[in-house]
Amino acid sequence: MSHASTADEVWGVAYHITPSRVEEVKEYLDIREINGYTIHEVPFYPADDHQSPIRTIAYIGTPENPQFTGPQDPPALAEHIWKSRGPSGDNKDYLLKLDESLDQLSPDSGDGHVKELATIVRALEAGSTATKQSQRNASIDAPN
């Protein structure tokens, strides 16, 4: 999926941070999101149309960032995600949780690119599990 075809609408969740914890939470997020993201102040529009937009900050990867790689072949990107691990854990776990969370937000909240990557990663996981099981079975059947 090219960036030119991405939706103008992005679904997510906004969290209210109590004033006494703002600095602590911001320090944590600054470390977690430091590589590839910059902080932007953005309006958040609650799903309830009767509420006014809320002022929020978001960590966004932009093309100006040296870590930004631009559009990539989805199967190659999914394999990279499947194999990668960062300070916060396995990248595949983050992707799969993001996909599940987007599906749970609203019937309209899915993201085609995230869904495609998650589907490929799940297939890689299934293939890896099947390969490991075959290897275990082969070692059990091997004569001593």
Image (tube, rainbow, N blue to C red):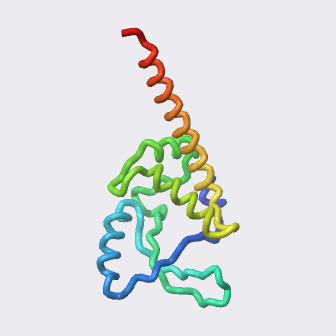
Give left or right: position of 107 versus 57: right
Choose top left, top right, bottom left or bottom right for residue 101. bottom right
Please tell me which residue lies in front, 33 or 62: 33
Identity of the residue drawn at 48% across and 81% down: 56
Q: Position of residue 110 (x, y in %)?
A: 64, 62
Please say if 86 is above or below 52.
above
Please say if 91 is above or below 20.
above
Choose top left, top right, bottom left or bottom right for residue 52. bottom right
Q: Residue furthest right?
A: 107
Q: Position of residue 54 (x, y in %)?
A: 53, 86
Give left or right: position of 122 versus 136: right
Identity of the residue drawn at 30% across and 73% down: 27
Give left or right: position of 113 versus 140: right
Q: Position of residue 123 (x, y in %)?
A: 58, 40
Identity of the residue drawn at 40% across and 82% down: 17
Please tell me which residue lies in front, 56 or 88: 88
Please tell me which residue lies in front, 119 or 70: 119
Q: Position of residue 21 (x, y in %)?
A: 32, 82
How many marks overall?
0
Give left or right: position of 119 versus 86: right
Identity of the residue drawn at 53% across and 45% down: 78
Quadrant location of the C terminus?
top left
